Amino acid sequence: GSTIGILGGGQLARMIVIAAAQLGYKTHVFCPESDSSASHVATETTKSNYNNYANLDIFASKVDVVTYEFENIMVEPVEYLAKKVGVFPDPKVLRICQDRVQEKRFIQSLDVPTAAFEPIDSLDTLKTAIQKVGYPAILKSNTMGYDGKGQVKITDQVDLESAWKKVTNETGAQRAILEQYIEFEGESSVIVARTIDSTELCFPLVTNKHRNHILRQTIAPAPLPPAVHAQAKEIATKIGKGIGLVGILAVELFVVKQADGNYKLLVNELAPRPHNSGHWTIEGCVTSQFEQLVRCICGLPLGSVDLMKRITEKEYLEQPAAQQHPIVMTNLLGAEVETWEKHLSIKGCHLHIYAKGDIKEGRKMGHINQTN
Ligand code: ATP
Ligand code: MG
Ligand code: MG
C-alpha cells in the first residue's frame, strides 16, 4: 500500500495516522521529538529537524504523498519536499496562512470581510496604526502565534512600548498585526475539504468556546440560523477555491450580531490542516475531518459529512428541541486528563487520549466527544 508522510508529531498527526490506517495506508511521521504523540501509532518515524535536507531526501523517497499538521512550520523545507513528492495543501497555502497580514489581505481580496487591520514592524508604525484602527485593538505577532501567544489587547490605558515588547519577546517575530477588536457574540468555525479534481464539501458550522485563549468546547452543529450556516459555508468554499486547496482548511469566524438583529461573519484566521474544532467529527460525522484529509490527498472521493444522528443537519437547524442535544467536544487540558476513567461509563461519551508525555497547564492531552 501507499505511504502518507506527515510533518509534525502532535495529536493532529496522531489522528491522521489512525484515519489513514483504517483506510489501509501506511504512515511515516517526520518530527524533531523522539517520543511524539503520533510516533506511537505511525508505521515509521524519522526523528529530525525540519531543515535537515539529507533526512528530507530519504523521507521523500519513502513516501507517496506528504501533508503537515501545523502552519507554523518553516516553509522552505516544505517547498524543497514539494519538488520531489506531492505535498498537500501546496506550500503556497502555508506561505499565506503562516503570515497574518498576508492571510487577511488574501481573504479581503476575495471580498470576504475580516477585522480592520494594519501591518506593524516597529513601535513607530504601531503608534501611527492605532490612530487608524482605534481602541480597543489587538496586537498579534505576525507569525508563530498559537493559543493566543504573542497577543496583547490594546486599550487607551495600555503602554504601546511594553505591548510591542511583549508581543515580539513571546514569539521572537519582529513583525506584527494590529487588528480592530471585535465585540462578537460568539466564535464559530467551518472546515472545507477539497480534492485534487476540485470537488469540495464543508463540514457543519460549529460554535467554539475558549478559556484563556485555548479552545475549551465545540458545539456541533452551531445553534445559529440556517442562513448563517449557509453564509459560513459559502465563505469557506470561496476561500478553499481561491487558495487552490487540496486537503482540508479550517476557517475561524467571529459571529457579530448587528443592530438589525442579523448576524455578520468576519474571518479571524485560517488553518490549512485538521483543526481542534473538527475533532467532534470523529464520532459525530459519517466521515471524520482526518479521513477527509486522507481522501483529499490520496485522490479518493470525498466522504459524507452527514451527522451520525437520526436527524439531518437541516432538521437539526430547524428544530429548537434538537438543538438542545448537540454533539459536544470538550478538550482535556493539562491535569484534567488524569481523571480520564470517569468518562468511560458515560453513555454516548467517546474518549480520545493523545499519549503525550508531560502534563503541562493548558496542554491539550485528549478530548471527549459527547454524541447524545
Ligand atoms: P489559535 O490557537 O486558534 O491558532 P491564535 O493564537 O492563532 O489562536 P487567534 O485565533 O487569532 O490566535 O486569536 C485567539 C483568540 O483571541 C480568538 O479566538 C478570539 O477569542 C480572540 N481574538 C483574536 N482576534 C480578535 C479580535 N480582532 N477581536 C476580538 N477578539 C479577538
Ligand atoms: Mg492560529
Ligand atoms: Mg485562532
Image: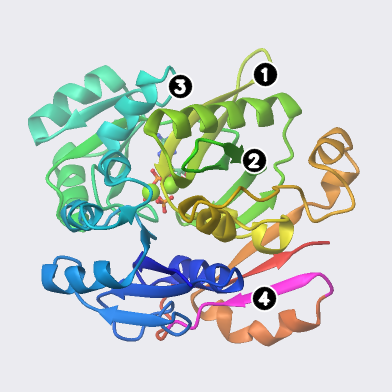
- The answer to whether residue 50 is left or right of residue 33 is left
For residue 262, the mark is: 1
Dot 2 or dot 1: first in sequence order is 2
Q: Who's the residue at 14% across and 65% down the image? A: 51
Task: Say whether mark 1 is within 8 Å of ligand 1.
Answer: no
Percent from the top left, x then y, of residue 243?
A: 38, 33
* Residue furthest out toward the front: 1
CA gap, disc 3 and disc 2: 17 Å
Q: Crowding at label 3, few (<14), some or many (≥20) Cα neighbours within 10 Å?
A: some
Disc 1 secondary structure class: loop
- Indicate the secondary structure of the residue bearing disc 4: strand
Q: Can residue 226 be spotted in the picture? A: yes
* Mark carried by residue 205: 2
> What is the three-letter code of the residue carrying label 2?
Leu
Query: Circle 4 sits on which residue?
Result: 351
- Distance from disc 4 to disc 1, alpha carbons, whole Å, reads 37 Å
Amino acid type indicated by mark 4: Leu
Query: Circle 4: is it few (<14), some (14-19), or many (20+) Cα within 10 Å?
Result: some
Q: Relative to 288, is 229 above or below?
A: above
Q: Is mark 4 within 8 Å of ligand 1?
A: no
Label at residue 350: none
Mark 3 or mark 1: whose residue is earlier in sequence:
3
Eyeballing the image, is 167 above or below 291?
A: above
| Disc 3: which residue | 112
Taking the spot 51% from the left edge, 59% from the top edge, the residue there is 294
Question: Which residue does the image show at 18% across and 37% down from the upper left?
Answer: 160
Q: Specify start and end residues of the magenta stretch as a single range.
A: 347-356
Q: For marks 2 and 1, give the CA distance.
A: 17 Å
User: Which residue shows up at 23% across the image and 19% down it?
Assistant: 131
